[in-house]
Amino acid sequence: MKTNVNSIKNGQMHLASINDDRTIMLEGARVHDVAAHPAFRQSAQTVASLYDFQAAHPEQMTFDIGKGKRVNRAWQWPRNYAQLVERREALTAWAEQHVGFMGRSPDHVASCISAMAMRADVFEAHGKGRGQALLDYYHYAREADLYLSYVIIDPQADRSKATGEQTDPFFTAAICDEDAQGITIKGAKMLGTSAVFANEVLVASLRPVRDGDDKYAFTAMVPIGAKGLKLMSRRSYEQTASSRFDYPLSSAYDENDSILYFDEVKVSWDRVFVHRNTAMSFAQFHTAPAHVYQNYQAQIRLAVKLRYLTGLARRVCETIGTVDFPQVKEQLGVLAAQAGMIEGLVHAMEVKGKLEGGGGPLDQGEFFIPDRATLYSANVLAQRLYPQVIETIRDLAGGGMIMLPSSAADFADPEIAALIGKTQHSPVTDAQGRVKTFKLAWDSVGSEFASRHTQYEMFYSGAKLFTAGHQYRTYDWDNATRLVDEMLSRYDLSTR
Ligand SMILES: Cc1cc2nc3c(=O)[nH]c(=O)nc-3n(C[C@H](O)[C@H](O)[C@H](O)COP(=O)(O)OP(=O)(O)OC[C@H]3O[C@@H](n4cnc5c(N)ncnc54)[C@H](O)[C@@H]3O)c2cc1C
């Protein structure tokens, strides 16, 4: 693996890097150029704009990896609290570029891989050479500032059965062959968000794999353009958005989701980090701090999104003149509290963070890790809270998001434009300003794009029972039950 990038990665460099004859299926045909196709081109430009932003703000967004080369701070290994905060500020600045609507922006899986590599010793202990492969890959991906995506969940089929019990043993991606060169993967994985825009995909199993089902227990990196890798894209919201004015978010921030099918894809050993080891499906994400780092990034992004949605709610209320009603102020206050809670939890997980290190082969020293239990508090609460936030904004907006002209084209017709002027009034803006605000509001909370976002925030980190399980596992129960025991010890039947 060679790197040939000598300066900070910018948008044009990224778009050139994904023009690789990848196999994307959409609407009965193959997509040949993601950056040019009407289903993807604006969102590809948004991805490119993130890299342009980092190139324009090198101190804030990137760090020096030696020999004058700088890459995104998502790859940074924080050694103390100050470095963690500096890194978070970069991730926040990136999230502000898309107001939190690109869930799998390049900093998400970069955070995961970087955190896996912090504990390369765990991978090396599982299999000689696997930790070194991970560490080498981390340095390669970091130096090229690659955009990585991941598929770490078995596709839904029959959830009452284990992976190996499905009717087709290669329904879920599994190792179907291996030799001196590497492994061959066959089967499907869900759900490759942003995979169409990425350079590579991490394939792994986040959920526990049963003993005996070891062919599913592997972790590997696959270039999106690899022979045999097929991406089946869901419907593009960007393609059906009539204009930026009508669908300001769908048209430019549709990060896409694809089912990935591995049609006997060969992966060389230097890209395999876990090989037929069921215990590693837990250890790779939880002994190594990958799960905490990927979800910490998600909460940083969500804090920006909730700040945006709270601001949007206020603008909506100003636009229809309800903002000074006491009941409306109460609803806005609750929204602000919900946004503030997630932001506060991000700060709390940093303050309560601590140094963790490895041991054994490939020990990389100590790293500053956000507090796991606080991360899961945010995670568990956020997936329940997001639909409530959306419902509050819908409640505050009333029919204003629907009482709208059909499209931006209506403004071009003098007769219709005059009618818009007669029917769209607001105490704070003109007719066009009112329509613009409400079209943005609809695309944020009500459109198909917005609806997919509610599903995303409810599920991207796992169904509720799994995230709550992580909270259950990491919460300081002794400190909680100690209080109960102390109270119980203060009295008995004879106490008055
Ligand atoms: C928009 C979107 C983007 C995504 N992007 C990615 C991505 O980039 N990469 C990736 O790897 N994954 C991605 N995912 C997948 C995501 O990780 C999964 O949706 C999540 O882990 C839940 O799995 P599932 O969808 O199969 O739901 P399931 O696990 O099938 O759950 C569906 C329902 O059944 C219930 N249920 C399931 N099992 C049990 C049980 N044993 N006991 C009781 N109830 C149960 C759940 O509580 C839930 O209510 C994405 C998902 C969405 C919606």
Image (cartoon, rainbow, N blue to C red):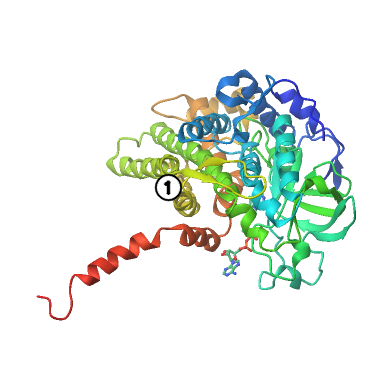
Q: Which residue does the image show at 50% across and 26% down from the upper left?
A: 433
Q: Can residue 402 be seen at all in this image of the molecule?
A: no
Q: Residue furthest front?
A: 360
Q: Residue furthest left?
A: 496
Q: Position of residue 220 (x, y in %)?
A: 76, 50
Q: Can residue 128 be seen at all in this image of the molecule?
A: yes
Q: Position of residue 353 (x, y in %)?
A: 45, 43
Nearer the observer, 218 or 385: 218
The residue tagged 1 is: 392
Which of the four quarters of the rendered structure image does ligand 1 lie in?
bottom right
**Position of the C terminus by quadrant:** bottom left
Direction from residue 125 to residue 4 in the image, left or right:
right
Q: Is mark 1 within 8 Å of ligand 1?
A: no
Q: Which residue does the image show at 23% across and 67% down from the upper left?
A: 487
Direction from residue 256 to residue 74 in the image, left or right:
left
User: Identity of the amino acid at label 1?
Assistant: Thr
Q: Is residue 362 depicted above or below 207 in this figure?
A: above
